[in-house]
Amino acid sequence: MRATLGEAHTLDSVAEAAGLTRRTVTRRFQKTTGTSFGSWLAEQRLALAQRLLEQTDKSMDMVAFEAGFGSATSLRQHFAARLRTSPMQYRREFSKGSTRVALSGV
């Protein structure tokens, strides 16, 4: 799934692909990862969005699409909920072209 985070992934589609019941996938997923399928997927998508914001100049819409959020609005909501910042602020602080100045020792 990590290779296709931009695609729609549901618990039902994963269960069907694995030839297992939804309940079995839920139980095994929780046991293996320590989290729910939905939480894991959101975290993986958020991590991909962070990498895209750090390493590319792609638009917010493109980052949201490639990371599987569907819209820039959804991307902003996930960033606010989990990282307490906006994607734009995150990019300003952590992008490859960031020109942050270290103030330690000043």
Image: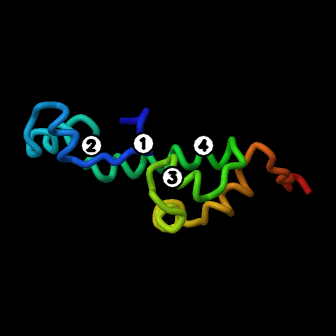
Describe the element under mark 2 as helix, strand or loop.
Answer: loop
Residues at circles 3 and 2 in contact by the CB criterion of under 8 Å: no
Q: Which mark is residue 5?
A: 1
**Which of the marked residues, 2 or 1, is nearer the chain's N terminus?**
1
Instruction: Give the alpha-carbon distance from disc 1 to disc 4, as whole Å.
Output: 13 Å
Amino acid marked by disc 3: Phe
**Which of the marked residues, 3 or 4, is nearer the chain's N terminus?**
4
Front of the two marks 1 and 4 = 1
| Quarter of the image where the N terminus is located | top left
Residue at the spot of label 3? 65
- Asked which quadrant contains residue 96, the reply is top right
**Which of the marked residues, 4 or 2, is nearer the chain's N terminus?**
2
Residues at circles 4 and 2 in contact by the CB criterion of under 8 Å: no
Q: Position of residue 82 (x, y in %)?
A: 47, 61
Instruction: Give the alpha-carbon distance from disc 4 to disc 2, as whole Å.
Output: 23 Å
Q: Residues within 10 Å of mark 3 (few under 14, many from 20)?
A: some
Amino acid marked by disc 1: Leu
Relative placement, left or right, of 31 versus 54 is: left
Describe the element under mark 3 as helix, strand or loop.
Answer: helix
Q: Position of residue 101 (x, y in %)?
A: 86, 53
**Which of the marked residues, 1 or 4, is nearer the chain's N terminus?**
1
Residues at circles 2 and 1 in contact by the CB criterion of under 8 Å: no
Describe the element under mark 1 as helix, strand or loop.
Answer: loop
Residue at the spot of label 2? 34
Residues at circles 3 and 4 in contact by the CB criterion of under 8 Å: no
Q: Position of residue 42 (x, y in %)?
A: 39, 52
Residues at circles 1 and 4 in contact by the CB criterion of under 8 Å: no
Instruction: Give the alpha-carbon distance from disc 3 to disc 2, as whole Å.
Output: 27 Å
Residue at the spot of label 4? 51
Front of the two marks 3 and 2 = 3
Instruction: Give the alpha-carbon distance from disc 2 to disc 1, as whole Å.
Output: 20 Å
